[in-house]
Amino acid sequence: MDALQVVAEPRRREILRLIWDEEMAAGEIAGHFDLTFGAVSQHLSVLREASLVEMRREGNRHIYKANLDALAPYRTVLEMMWGGALEDLKTAVESKGD
């Protein structure tokens, strides 16, 4: 699977957003989703296979971070998607106040 197909999946994009600037343990990442830990783990595996995330072990924990070098060609598109989602949320919240 090529990198573009990998980042096309919304949950994988959200995982990348979470670990873009900081490392997170797999359990912490999973806590942000209404998915089983196994499902999140599968998404992390796909991201690793595409070399879009890096993983290291810390005891029995798996710590993930985005591979910013590999993601460089997609950075602008991803940030626009994340920014667009935030803008949509802001608009929705503001319209509820009317």
Image: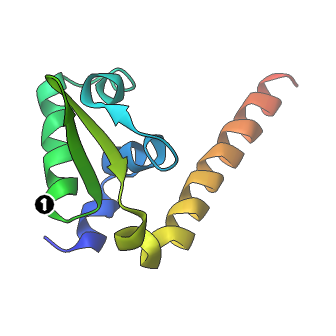
Position of the N terminus, as image quadrant, is bottom left
Q: In this view, which residue lies farthest toward the front?
A: 59
The residue that mark 1 highlights is: 49
Q: Is residue 42 above or below residue 27?
A: below
Residue 61, x across and y down, in percent:
20, 25
25 vs 16, left or right, is: left
| Residue name at image x 26 percent, y 71 percent | 3
> In the image, 21: left or right of 25?
right
29 or 59: nearer the eye? Answer: 59
78 lies above or below 12: below
In this rendering, is residue 59 above or below 74?
A: above
Which three-letter amino acid code belongs to the residue tagged 1?
A: Glu
Q: Assign the C terminus to one quadrant of the image.
A: top right
Q: Residue drawn 56% across and 71% down?
A: 76
Q: Say how many tags the image has.
A: 1
Tell me which residue sits at (15%, 33%) in the image. 39
Badge 1 density bin: few <14, some 14–19, many ≥20, Cα 10 Å: some
Q: Can you tell which quarter of the image residue 58 is in?
A: top left
Question: Looking at the image, is 70 positioned above or below residue 53?
Answer: below
Q: Residue 94: percent from the left, percent from the top?
A: 82, 31
**What residue appears at the point 47 percent right and 47 percent down from the top-left corner?**
17
Badge 1 element: helix
- Outermost residue on the right side: it is 98
When asked about the image quadrant of residue 97, the answer is top right
Q: How is the image coloured?
A: rainbow
